[in-house]
Amino acid sequence: MMPTVSVIIATYNYGRYVADAVESALGQTLGDLEIIIVDDGSTDDTPDVVRPFLHDRRVQYHPLDHGGQPAAKNAGIRLARAPAVAFLDADDLWLPTKLEKQVALLKTSSHAGVVYARRMLIDEQGRPLHYDQPTLYRGRVLKPMFRDNFVCFSSALIRRAVFDDVGMFDESLPLAIDYDLWLRVAKKHEFDYVDEPLVLYRTGHASLSRRTEERLFIADRIMKRFLTEYGGASALPPAVVRRARAETCYHIALARRGRSRWRALRWYLLALTWWPTCGPAWHGLASLPLPETVRRCLRMLLGRPADWAVRSPLSPDCPTSSARRLEVCSPRG
């Protein structure tokens, strides 16, 4: 009998977390599901951790040679039998009613290709962290999605037919694979969400934060390709494109500045080329000649974070979207 939902858990060396993830999937109030664990060539104790769960007929385990997250997730999609596919990163957790509420919404929201939800943050040990809930969007979401990946990956429930329409994950991308997929989906399909936190998103343990510059360059590459190869240029207002490109250039400047202030110069200028009134880019450009200690002292005297890369709420003069596009929800181990 065909399950209602196929749950895909792609994992790589997350033996310390994957049992909790599987248990949170098995503990769903919607029991009509299959759980497809795709092991992307783990070298830790993942096989031993997963083995006890295989006594449940709903759980499958598929070990692969290490090929990266997009290949592992695509393998899970190919194995999925249900009309809806849910992704759960191996270090995240679901609350018990997550799938039940999303499936109900997917049935009533007939035009939606993706249903997602809010999340709560937890640390490495599973302790709750403070998190200000962001603005979410439903319906045709391409414009806000281009600027900000607001979909928590482990919250996504996707109609299986969507992959037939827009394709699967791009296996050439090492990072930001969800952002690339959501752009292609948002161009053709509507999104909807359950307006409550249904995912516990674990943070503070992965290595993504140490790859900021790489992630931002990949985001820039994804944006360019979407505009030129996937019809994004005709689907998006020019003002949205200019602002999003400026935000990405600004954050690349911040990342490059950490290693050499003058490496940031070109990217500040590119940000201003895209969006001439980008205040943070002007401030960053003006501060380049200042010694780092002087710059930090000035900002502290003004009551601002010492590091300009630290941003809290989004605002018209505070382009943090390009950082959120990658840091908030990208799939991990």
Image: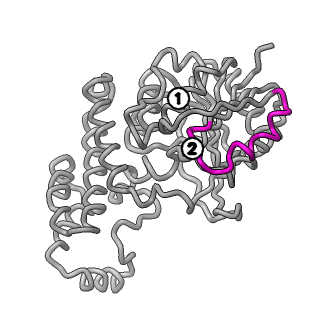
To which residue does mark 1 refer? 139
* Placement of 153 over or under 112, stated as above or below: below
Task: Tell me the amino acid under the disc marked 2.
Answer: Cys
Is residue 161 at all visible to an observer of this figure? yes
Q: Quadrant of residue 198?
A: top right
What residue lies at 50% left-to-right and 45% top-to-bottom? 330
The residue range painted magenta reads: 39-57
Q: Which x, y percent locates residue 65?
A: 53, 34
Q: Secondary structure at mark 2?
A: loop
Q: Is 323 colored magenta in this rendering?
A: no
Q: Is 51 colored magenta in this rendering?
A: yes
* Placement of 89 over or under 5, stated as above or below: below
Q: Nearer the viewer, residue 149 or 75?
A: 75
Task: Tell me the amino acid under the disc marked 1.
Answer: Gly
What residue lies at 84% left-to-right and 35% top-to-bottom? 29
Characterize the local packing of mark 2: few (<14), some (14-19) or many (20 or more) Cα atoms within 10 angstroms.
some
Q: Which x, y percent locates residue 311?
A: 41, 64
